[in-house]
Amino acid sequence: MRKLYVLLPALLLLAGSCSNNPYKATNKSYKKQSKAFAKLLQQYPLQDSVNNAPYFVGTTNLSMRRPNFVIIHHTAQNSCEQTLKTFTLPRTQVSAHYVICRDGTVFHMLNDYLRAHHAGISKWGNATDINSNSIGIELDNNGFEYFDERQISSLNLLLERLKKSFNIPAANFIGHGDIAPTRKNDPNWRFPWKTLSEKGFGLWWSDTANVQVPEAFDYLTAIRLVGYDIKDSSAAIVGFKRHFMMDTTRGMTPEATKVLYQLHKKYL
């Protein structure tokens, strides 16, 4: 009986915290959709598949699809609560796997194996359906602020887990502005890409003090080799300079060319 008295306050506290969840209603929608996907996977074979074989043969060699990229965003909104609400309104049709608030709180909004709607029309290297092979992480930041140290600390811990869980290459930690430079600029130029690269999340360039760029160096080809879509070369250059030089000006400069020359060799 004594044990019951000890446990009862804890159980009441847990029940109260669940009942006070402002997203209780939308969580039901999440669970409903998850169950629908699970039901779809249980169809052997799928109902819409061509089925003219005399019997079904299921392979014994399979696994879940795994993300190969991590795309980092800033929310372009003014609070974490505003973003959480945006991602729980069906009419917005946008989402992310994680939202990290300024104080470092991490909301895991979608199972890592499911497809979030965060990248939109985008391209990186030969990958064009980025939503289908990536994890989307949103940082609470309106786009005009530096990022809170607590937020970056939580991000580093999350990236460490994701990299280990899914064996994501260092080069595949990139930003929304990298995969969609004509439309997006997030995370903004204040984001500490260099610091992240030192922890294995993203690549970085070496010292350019003694770099001699060959006359035949084609900087657009080099930008493409890094991963940028050069269909709009001006946007690609801005995206590259924003990420690797914290510079939002247009056009290549001698220093930018040196940085790119050092950098592109790491992607070969």
Image (cartoon, rainbow, N blue to C red):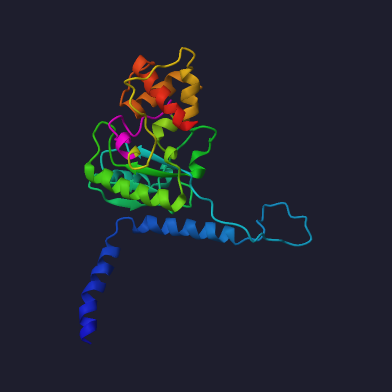
Decide which of 242, 8 is in the foreground and name it.
242
> Which image quadrant: the N terminus?
bottom left
- In the rendered image, residue 87, in percent from the top left (x then y), is placed at 37, 46
- In the rendered image, residue 105, in percent from the top left (x then y), is placed at 27, 51
- In the rendered image, residue 250, in percent from the top left (x then y), is placed at 36, 17
x 46%, y 12%: residue: 215
Q: Quadrant of residue 126?
A: top right
Residue 58: within the magenta?
no
Q: Is residue 227 left or right of residue 192?
A: right
x 26%, y 31%: residue: 144
Q: Quadrant of residue 187?
A: top left
Q: Is residue 194 left or right of residue 128?
A: left
Say if 268 sits above or below 150 in the image. above
Give the extent of the magenta segment.
181-196
- In the rendered image, residue 202, in percent from the top left (x then y), is placed at 39, 37
Residue 160 visible in this rendered orientation of the protein: yes
Decide which of 237, 170 is in the foreground and name it.
170
Residue 112 visible in this rendered orientation of the protein: no
Say if 20 sits above or below 118 in the image. below
x 47%, y 32%: residue: 267
Q: Is residue 61 left or right of residue 83?
A: right
Decide which of 225, 243 is in the foreground and name it.
225
Decide which of 194, 144 is in the foreground and name it.
194
Residue 185: within the magenta?
yes
Q: Main secondary structure of the magenta part?
A: loop
Q: Is residue 100 left or right of residue 114?
A: left
